[in-house]
Amino acid sequence: MELFWKENVVNKLDGLLQKKVQDEYFTPDEMVNRIIPFLKPRSTILCPFSKADSRFVVRFIEEGFTVKYGHIETGQDFFLWSKKDLYDVDYIIDNPPFSQKFEVVKRLYELGKNFAMVFNIGGLFTGKIVNFLDENSLKFNLVIPSKRTSFIDGTKPNDKGQNPLFLSVYFCNFLNHNEAVK
């Protein structure tokens, strides 16, 4: 397990933390478990919007993956990482801040790594994202759970999960078939 540190993080923490109040929803095991069968065993995964106690980090380690993680609160800014920083990463997987979904999608394609991000299906296909994907002829896949996911509000971590009015899916770029990796 390795914490992904950046030395020269742009100090936009205050603004992001204010947005984060509405963006910080913790992903439960059921949603994390949904992507695991599609991953190659013993891969290295980056969780760029997670801390050490994130269910992504914990579950991936339990499954034998090498996990790197980082969070803006601990000084890691996903938007400042370079391809060189991620040379040994096989997958980038997480539940990114909803308010930055377009920027996250754009950055993921720039980095050229395999990725799977949790998004609400309605919010994912905004005109801006659809135009970006279309204009750049970018391919993607969706992994769709069989039911809605109950997330935990980051401002109330002791409350039971919040059942959203939308379906959350994994937006991915690495699936070439309909079966999970054996």
Image (spheres, rainbow, N blue to C red):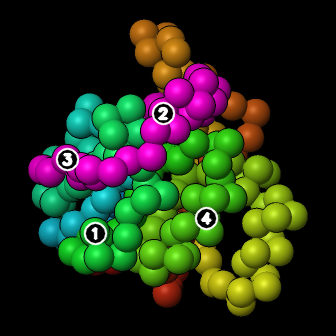
Badge 1 marks a residue whose secondary structure is helix
Query: In the figure, residue 42 lies in which quadrant?
Result: bottom left
Residue 169 picture location, percent across and down: 60, 55
Query: Which tag is nearer the camera, tag 3 or tag 2?
Result: 2
Q: Earlier in the sequence, mark 1 or mark 4?
A: 1
Badge 3 marks a residue whose secondary structure is strand
The residue closer to the viewer here, 143 or 101, is 101
Name the residue rendered at 61%, 64% in the picture. Answer: 105
Question: Which amino acid is tagged 1?
Answer: Asp
Question: Which amino acid is tagged 3?
Answer: Leu
Residue wearing tag 1: 85
Badge 2 marks a residue whose secondary structure is helix
Classify 43 as above or below 4: below
Residue wearing tag 2: 13
- The stretch of residues the image draws in magenta is 1-28
Q: Earlier in the sequence, mark 3 or mark 1?
A: 3
